[in-house]
Image: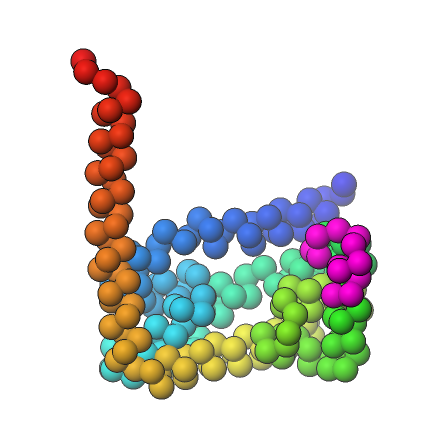
Amino acid sequence: MQREDRIILGGLVASGLIPLVMWPLVPALVASHPALLELLRGSMASIINMGARARVGETSIVLAVLLGIPSLMMFDWVYWWAGRRWGDGVFVWLLGGNTPRAEKRLARLRRLEARFGPWAVALAYLLPVPTVLIYAAVGDGGMRLKTFLVLDVIGTLLWTGLLALAGYAIGRRAVDVADGVAHYSLWATLALAVLAGLWASRRRGPA
């Protein structure tokens, strides 16, 4: 394995681990620091939450659209590079092995790539296949990194804009739901801490 392969593999692993590590931040930030949550996670819920808060005057719709872009695009180049460097081999790994089902999904991906061409990247969030597969496919197809990044920005802006506008349309109801999640998640965390303390004391037994 060469240096480039190790970088790609590390990026692929990090792209899966970082969202899991940041997941506990959701109840802590969803109501108190929604902008920071969107910046760090860029999840659908965080963008919709910010769009809803823009509707009630707590933030700007522009921020709701833009804040999620860095985290959403953070590892896209890794999947493009994996496709560029590893070719069809990357799909065996991403699709879970060389199986008939994986071959059918790959054939479907090839059809979408042929139909939409480079604009498959800009429409990646709206197409019925995982975005990472599209990024790897265009890398395998020879798309230049500069072209990929430009189209990726367009596609990500389209996605965050749609989600932010959805939140804006919902408005106060979405804000109330997010605040409720933050409130009850706090109490659930405290309850789990108490239970963990009681369980540890019981395991130790009497002094």
> Compared with residue 118, is residue 204 higher up or lower down, i.e. above or below?
above
Quarter of the image for the C terminus: give it: top left
Residue, far bottom:
169
Task: Give left or right: position of 173 versus 7.
Answer: left
Q: Residue at x 47, y 82 (%)?
A: 162
* Percent position of residue 123, x then y: 62, 79
Q: Residue at x 37, y 79 (%)?
A: 167
Q: Is residue 90 magenta?
A: no
> Compared with residue 41, is residue 191 higher up or lower down, i.e. above or below?
above
Q: Residue at x 63, y 76 (%)?
A: 127
Q: Is residue 95 magenta?
A: yes
Q: Looking at this view, is 125 or 177 the one in front?
A: 177
* Percent position of residue 149, x then y: 63, 71
Camera sees residue 171: yes
* Percent position of residue 120, x then y: 69, 77
Task: Give left or right: position of 36 versus 154.
Answer: left
Quarter of the image for the N terminus: give it: top right
Task: Give left or right: position of 51 versus 156.
Answer: left
**Color encoding of the figure:** rainbow
Q: Residue at x 74, y 70 (%)?
A: 109
* Percent position of residue 59, x then y: 29, 77
Camera sees residue 64: no
**Which of the 4 image quadrants contains residue 32?**
bottom left
> Compared with residue 163, is residue 30 higher up or lower down, i.e. above or below?
above
Q: State the extent of the magenta-drawn residues as a range.
A: 94-105
Task: Give left or right: position of 136 versus 19.
Answer: right
